[in-house]
Image (cartoon, helix red, strand yellow):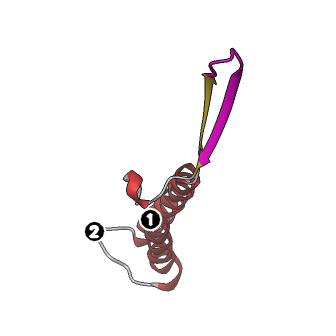
């Protein structure tokens, strides 16, 4: 969702900066457009980072002692799913 929000902010900022030629006495629409474009880039990058963090896998290594004195090592790898609270 944050990736889409970043794109929307960037597009609205670009429209305010480059497409509108309206003079408003109480606001500088070009500056507001540049601020929205910067915020859109930041939100987009944060969304990419959060998506990359969400795709990590968990590796669990367990070493168990067998009755004959030997050791057995088990590794399990799993990707986080929708039931892990990450949506």
> Circles 1 and 2: CB distance less than 8 Å?
no
Q: Nearer the viewer, mark 1 or mark 2?
A: 1
Please tell me whether residue 21 is drawn above or below residue 30 in the rendered image. below
| x 39%, y 57%: residue | 83
Q: Secondary structure at mark 2?
A: loop
- Residue 12: x percent and y percent? 44, 76
Q: Secondary structure at mark 1?
A: helix
Residue, far left: 26
Please tell me whether residue 25 is drawn above or below residue 45 in the rendered image. below
Query: Which of disc 2 and disc 1 is earlier in sequence?
Result: 2
Q: In which quadrant of the rendered view does residue 76 lie?
A: top right
Q: In which quadrant of the rendered view does residue 28 lie?
A: bottom left
| x 42%, y 67%: residue | 1
- For residue 14, the mark is none
66 in the magenta segment:
yes
- Residue 26: x percent and y percent? 28, 68
- Residue 57: x percent and y percent? 59, 47
- For residue 36, the mark is 1
| x 69%, y 14%: residue | 69
Please give the residue where the numbered disc 2 appears in the rendered image. Answer: 26
**Toward the viewer: 11 or 33?**
11
| x 71%, y 19%: residue | 70
The magenta segment is 65-77
14 in the magenta segment:
no
**Toward the viewer: 84 or 33?**
84
Q: Main secondary structure of the magenta part?
A: strand
Disc 2 residue crowd, few under 14, some 14–19, many 20+, Cα 10 Å = few
**Toward the viewer: 3 or 41?**
3
- Residue 2: x percent and y percent? 44, 63
Disc 1 residue crowd, few under 14, some 14–19, many 20+, Cα 10 Å = many
């Amino acid at each position: 969702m944050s990736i889409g929000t970043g794109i929307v902010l960037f597009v609205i900022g670009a429209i305010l900066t480059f497409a509108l030629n309206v003079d408003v006495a109480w606001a500088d629409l070009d500056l507001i457009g540049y601020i929205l474009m910067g915020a859109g880039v930041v939100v987009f990058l944060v969304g990419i980072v959060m998506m990359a963090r969400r795709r990590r896998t968990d590796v669990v290594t367990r070493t168990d002692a067998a009755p004959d004195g030997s050791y057995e090592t088990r590794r399990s790898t799993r990707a986080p799913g929708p039931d892990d609270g990450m949506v």
